[in-house]
Every structure is written in structure tokens, then in C-alpha cells.
Image (tube, helix red, strand yellow):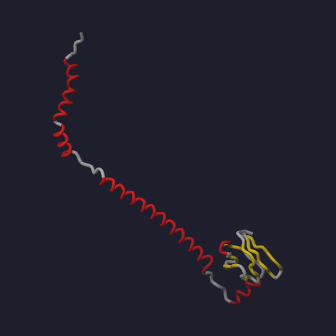
Amino acid sequence: MMYLSNKQMIQLAVPALLAVALLYFQDEILTLMHEELPQHKVGKILSEEVNIYLRINRDINLYNTIEKKVKKRELSSAWLSKNFLYKKKSFKSDMKTQKKVKKYTWRLDAVFPKHDMAIMNAQFVHSNSIINNAKVIKIKFDSVLLKTSKGLRWVHLFH
């Protein structure tokens, strides 16, 4: 036969007594907890707020992406206008001296074969254009074929 001390008897009885007390007073305990503890929104209201937050976050990311693209386009258009579109033209007397100095020189700056266009000597040209007494015959992805008084000549990018 085994005998239990008073301390051991209390340790065995306390959980059982607490369980009976919780079962009997559960409504009063829940009411007290709702009154004393803060309540959190649950269910439909919380999910709606989460959806609103996610939509706002997505819109912010989209706005930031668009803003970056706009800045990049502004920089590109400023560079194009500075380097190609609004070049100061020389006076006629200066142009005659320039033609004499650069009579048969060509520099290919950019090529746009899909549009059949190129930029040569800082001027836009297309097939059948005339530049420095040479006619543009063909535009490829990396070169332009010119017909000069001395014959056909290929002008390549980066040469």
C-alpha cells in the first residue's frame, strides 16, 4: 500500500478543482476577459483592411516604377535634344569652309535599321538621302552604304 503526503494530495487535487471551477464559471470569466482585455478586429473587417493595405502598397510600387521610367526618358530626351536636335547651324560662309575641310569624311553615329534611318555626322539620314555629296544607298544594323563620286563605300559604326 502506498501513502501520499498532504503536499502530494494537494498537488493532485488542485488541477481537478481548477478544471471544475473553470467549467462552472466559464461565462463569467469570458465576460470579464472581454471587458478587461482589448478586443481585436477579426473576420471580414480585418481582411478588408489587409486588402486595402496590399492595394495601396502595390500602387506605391507601380508609381515608383513609373517615376523611374519617366526620369530615365527625360534624361534620354534631354541628351538627344542636346546632341542631335538643336545643334546651332553655321553661317553659309562657315559651311563652305567646313565642306572644304570635311569634303569626303563621314562618321556614323547611330543606326536604326527597322526605320531605315541613321545618324551620320550628327544629321538624320535615310535611304536616298544626300550627305556630303554622297547618296545613302543601304542602311544595315551596323553600317551604311554610300555612293560617292569615287564609287561605293561602307561606313561602319565605331570606326
On screen, 46 above or below 137? above
Q: Residue furthest bottom?
A: 93
In screen coordinates, is 77 left or right of 12? right
Residue 94, located in which quarter of the rendered image?
bottom right
Q: Residue at x 20, y 41 (%)?
A: 30
Q: Nearer the viewer, residue 58 or 103?
A: 58
Q: Nearer the viewer, residue 56 or 110?
A: 56
Picture quarter with the C terminus: bottom right
In screen coordinates, is 154 left or right of 113? right
- Can you give x and y, in whole percent of width and height, for residue 50 in the image? 35, 55
On screen, 8 above or below 105? above
Residue 139, located in which quarter of the rendered image?
bottom right
Q: Residue at x 70, y 77 (%)?
A: 121
Picture quarter with the N terminus: top left
Q: Residue furthest top?
A: 1
- Can you give x and y, in whole percent of width and height, for residue 97 in the image? 74, 86
In screen coordinates, is 148 left or right of 32? right
Residue 143, located in which quarter of the rendered image?
bottom right
- Can you give x and y, in whole percent of width and height, for residue 111 in the image? 68, 72
Q: Residue at x 62, y 76 (%)?
A: 83
- Can you give x and y, in whole percent of width and height, for residue 85 in the image? 61, 79
Q: Nearer the viewer, residue 55 or 118?
A: 55
